[in-house]
Image: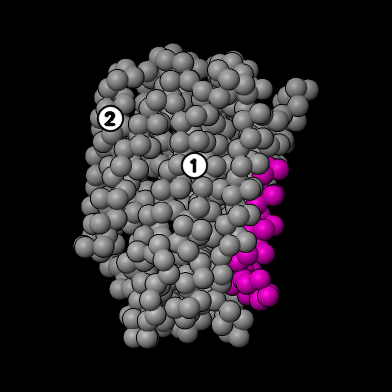
Amino acid sequence: MTDAARRATHPARYAVGMFGTSIPINLIKGSMILFYVDLLGLDVRIYGIVMVAYAIIDAIDNPLLGFLSDRTRTRWGRRRPWLLVGAPVLAVGTIALFAVPDSLDGAGLVIWFATFVIICEASDSMLNANYGALLPELFPREKERSVANSLRQGFQLLALVVSLALTPWLTTSVFGTEQTTGGFTITAVLYSVLALAVILYMTLGIREDPQVEDEARPPLLGTIKVILTNPRFWQIGAASACYLSAMGLVLTGVQLYVRYSLGLQVAYAMYLQGVVILATVGFLALWTRVVRTRGAPFTWRLAFVLLALGFIPLYLAHDLLTAILAGLFLGVGYSGMLASNDLVIARVLDEDAAVNGVRREGIFLAAFGFFGRLGGAVVGGALASLGLFFGYYSGDDPGTQADAAWRVYVCVYPMGLAALGAVIAFLTPVPDNVRERVSSSAPRVSPAPGRD
């Protein structure tokens, strides 16, 4: 991509899209268990089965959507048409997921839940396969890529403030109560409209490389073979899966951790989640500097270690104050992962494009997304284990060890996953930024105003 073409897309315009793509899916992940299991009484075993099916479907549609995106050739680019389709579908699916008719119960409730959670999953996959694929294409040099990535992670954290920290307060105090579901419906409508507006703003402002229209379309079987025979894909993908699954458990369980393990009302989750997010934001600039001075691989490995250690104080917390202090430690490692994980993955995409002469970021990123989407199966399995080990089956049947159940779910399981990810990261060779070397050999024009 020429520098003139890259200059047409400002990093902030691209980065703000992360705010829009993050709000609906984080509302879903952060409140779905509370909504369906604790409030509507869906059995955790049924919930677990649906989430395993969710993960299987995700494993199929992610690479397919990425492949179709790579082969798309339109006057508006490869990625923009998919973003324009996925955004409204995700918005509608999110609203429906939290607008369950009062008459639904039993099998009807299960069907409603399964239908709309899978619709949300598919549209989220469509958005993220295309949005993420734009990062290495628009910003080939690691310096500017790290800035764009940090900006988008900052917007993601802002989205977490809105969709996680504010949600318990909005759903239980502003629009509803601790024991009713109406607040979730109103909140879902507000978040979906906001997300749709932001995604459309981002999509209409990005400028893809017009030279791609003349490139050959990547073949399906050849691409699959290249991906499956690439050892770095498996190694880095497995490490990323550990990180994403660990944070997925925290995201889905923190409200019930507050209710059962800390003995507080769900609304207090706002303070715990807010502190973790603010700590993450505060350390993001520092981690970005580490990336630019020591490189993404060093940062990635260090962040993994700190993330695993950060769960120990959270496990030992016994009230809101100690949980908030523990959240500060957790935010350090989480911030480092946000600053480095996507950059490590992008290097694999760069290497493939340089070695094979074909740009197929969509299917490669979607294939990496398969590892992240395994988090759905991990969540389902971990949730089902609470019934087996602690007797927690639902809000209607929480058993006598709900405190220990949610402490293990939010702290012990994620710590084990993060520790495993750290081991894999230290054993994995990360490729150089090949695209940066190629880009640096070309003449460079002055950057656009406002760019770092």
Query: Which amino acid type corresponds to the residue marked 1 in the rendered image?
Result: Ala
The x and y percentages for residue 149 are 40, 58
Classified by dominant secondary structure, the portion drawn in magenta counts as helix
Quadrant of res 59: bottom right
| Residue 194 location, quadrant | top right
For label 1, the residue is 159
- Check the image and name the residue furthest to the right: 103
Q: Is residue 375 above or below residue 205?
A: above
Hey, what amino acid is under mark 2? Ala
Left or right: 74, with 445 as reference point:
right
Taking the magenta stretch, the answer to whether it contains residue 427 is no
Above or below, 189 against 204 in this view is above
Above or below — where is 213 with respect to 448? below
In the rendered view, does 307 fall on the left or right side of 223?
left
User: Range of the magenta residues?
Assistant: 66-93
**Relative depth, front residue between 247 and 193:** 193
Q: Which residue is mark 2?
A: 326
Left or right? Give the position of 431 relative to 29.
left
Residue 195 in the image: state x and y as whole percent: 60, 45
